[in-house]
Amino acid sequence: MGNIKDIVDLAIQLEGRVKDRKDIETLRSIISLTQAVQASDAEIVERDVRVMQENAKLVQENAELQRQLAASQAEDIRIHKGIEFRCGKRTGNKWQAFCPKCHMPAQFAVMSGTVHGRVMACSGRCGWNVFSKLDLEQLIGELEV
């Protein structure tokens, strides 16, 4: 804004020294336009300040929402006998089995011809599986000890 004020001051000084009426009108137009630019510049600065304040507020709100989201998605995770177990809000605060490879839910399947007869496998079919003599409730019971 200092440069615009300097232009206005110089134009006013020049106006006092000019003798031709046409030049005086031109200088007055320059002064008028410069003052309009100065007013517009002031509005832009005010708007920028408001936008910066709003942005700071939004950044703060976003950080709080991120914190709340992280807290709502928090889970206890344990690996036991090659199986990933999770307990949190999305599992109904109960221990559930997941694939430790791709983190999809795990499920038991009975396989004939195996020594143990039971295999925990990935529901997403990523290829992960583990044999277990224990059923899911027994495995979860071991977690809570």
Image (cartoon, grey):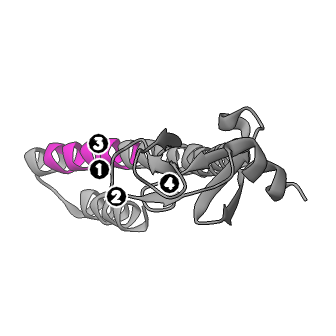
Q: Where does the image place residue 47, in percent across and percent down from the top left?
A: 48, 42
Locate residue 117 relative to residue 95 in the image: left or right. left
Q: Earlier in the sequence, mark 2 or mark 1?
A: 2
State the residue position of label 2.
Answer: 8
Name the disc covering residue 32, or none: 3
Which region is colored magenta? 25-39
Q: Earlier in the sequence, mark 4 or mark 2?
A: 2
Q: Quadrant of the N terminus?
A: bottom left
Q: Are marks 3 and 2 in contact (CB under 8 Å)?
A: no
Mark 2: few/some/many CA within 10 Å (<14, 14-19, 20+): many
- Between residues 69 and 80, which one lies in front from this camera angle? 80
For the point 20% across and 51% down, the residue is 27
Q: Quadrant of the C terminus?
A: bottom right
Total numbered labels placed on residues in the image: 4
Q: Are marks 4 and 1 in contact (CB under 8 Å)?
A: no
Mark 3: few/some/many CA within 10 Å (<14, 14-19, 20+): few
Mark 4 or 1, closer to the camera: 4
Q: Amino acid at mark 3?
A: Ser
Q: Are marks 2 and 1 in contact (CB under 8 Å)?
A: yes
State the residue position of label 1.
Answer: 34
| Residue 38 is covered by the magenta coloring | yes
Instruction: Tell me how far mark 3 sits from mark 2, CA to CA.
Output: 9 Å
Mark 4: few/some/many CA within 10 Å (<14, 14-19, 20+): many
Instruction: Tell me how far mark 4 sits from mark 3, CA to CA.
Output: 74 Å
Instruction: Tell me how far mark 2 sits from mark 1, CA to CA.
Output: 7 Å
Indicate whether 122 appears above or below 6: above
Instruction: Tell me how far mark 1 sits from mark 3, CA to CA.
Output: 5 Å
State the residue position of label 4.
Answer: 99
Locate residue 122 relative to residue 12 in the image: left or right. right
For the point 42% across and 41% down, the residue is 123
- Predominant SS along the magenta part: helix
